[in-house]
Amino acid sequence: MSSLQAVLGLLVFIALALVLGERRQLPPWKLLIAGLGLQFAFALLVFRVDLVRQGLYGINRAVAAIVNATEAGTLFVFGYLGGDPANVAYPFSVEDPAATVILAFRILPLILIFTVLSAILWHYRVLPLIVQGFSLLLRRSLGVGGAVGLSAAANVFVGMVESPALVRPYLAALSRSELFIVMSCGMATIAGSVMVLYSVILDGVVDNALGHIITASVISAPAAIMLAMIMIPPERSHPVDNQPPVRSQYHSLMDAITRGTGDGLQLTANVAAMLIVLVALVALTNSALSLLPDLGGAPLTLQRIFALLFAPLAWLMGIPWQEAQTAGNLMGIKTVLNELLAFLALADLPADSLSEKSTVIMTYALCGFANFGSLGIMIAGLTGMCPSRAREIVALAPRSLISGTLATCMTGAIAGLLL
């Protein structure tokens, strides 16, 4: 039954993209075959090829080493507040070790460390080679231009503003459809700087968490391209094919470490500030909703509203209906707030709220930047890079939120089919 739900879901998500698009013309079969084929191919590599799975488990072990190394730094700066009670002598007895996990001291510093590691890998051309290889695959299979392919591939590893910056000289020359592809990919994927953070949050909740998160970001890229081309079909037969070379922006190893630390510090501070603001706004909104009459014997909250709105989408991903409202609540948190809060909520769910399969499906569905806060960041970044198209970027932004959400829903459905 869940497989039939997921197949129906894939059809519905594509149909929604068609209905919510600009011209509502039937997409070419080649686009659908290539987009779905790439998604299934990437997913099959992870779920069925043992060598790939072992490689992702190896990455998880490397993440554990990064977490331990980060703890050494947080212990030095924050003292016992930055360490695990199993490895640190606390000045008081600890009855609940989980209560000592303070987000600001134990979790957010991972963003800082991983941003620096990404800068080092970029300087030594490890990430650029991966990005260019993935870009070539997208261009050959989906027919996108070089500049768009490079930006889409980079989105798997860097943020929704950093990836368009790689093709900044070409932004003004992109067609409306190509610009929308760039924006949609930014909404459907997550940056490498937060992958480790999310995998640590889901440690013990999902087996091989980082492997699933990396796979989700990779799978969502072709889905976002396909859905973007359905919603806003290409205007011309010859896309912008010039692909700029991926050059290192760092002059030396120390320059990569120094600038990576500065970028990571800014990102960490922004994440912390956004969390404070968003959680406070949700609490304030729920206080206002509590003034309304109870619904079904319980107070009306944003969480209950989101659960109702997104439950059908969760069901279409292959999640049983009795779990769909819980999953819909997570989708609502991710869309209106951000994916970090959604992952934290997923990790804090009671053990019987979602089955193991549903938990993995939601891991894939939540793995994207499609939320209102990220939308504002992307608009600010793109309009700053290409002021001449600011009005067009703002007009396309709401649709990119929809295409990004539908892409992650398709990714969740495909994960459900192969589990």
Image (spheres, rainbow, N blue to C red):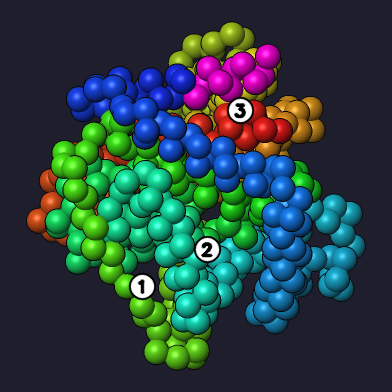
Q: Is residue 102 visible?
A: yes
> Mark 1 = which residue?
246
Q: Earlier in the sequence, mark 1 or mark 2?
A: 2
Badge 2: residue crowd in 10 Å (few <14, some 14–19, many ≥20): many
Badge 3: residue crowd in 10 Å (few <14, some 14–19, many ≥20): many
User: Would residue 254 be counted in the magenta stretch?
Assistant: no
- Total labels drawn: 3
Q: Position of residue 312 (x, y in %)?
A: 52, 17
Kindly identify the amino acid type of the residue bearing the numbered disc 3.
Ala
> Mark 2 = which residue?
193
Side (left or right) of 337 relative to 234: right
Q: Earlier in the sequence, mark 3 or mark 2?
A: 2
Q: Residue at x 68, y 37 (%)?
A: 360
Identify the secondary structure beneath mark 1. Answer: loop
Specify the segment rendered in magenta: 1-10
Identify the secondary structure beneath mark 3. Answer: helix
Q: Residue at x 52, y 50 (%)?
A: 218
Q: Position of residue 19 (x, y in %)?
A: 30, 20
Please identify the quadrant where the N terminus is shown.
top right
> Mark 3 = which residue?
327
305 or 165: nearer the viewer: 165
Q: Main secondary structure of the magenta part?
A: helix
Residue 228, by quadrant, is top left
183 or 342: nearer the viewer: 183
Kindly identify the amino acid type of the residue bearing the numbered disc 1.
Val
Q: Residue at x 19, y 42 (%)?
A: 237
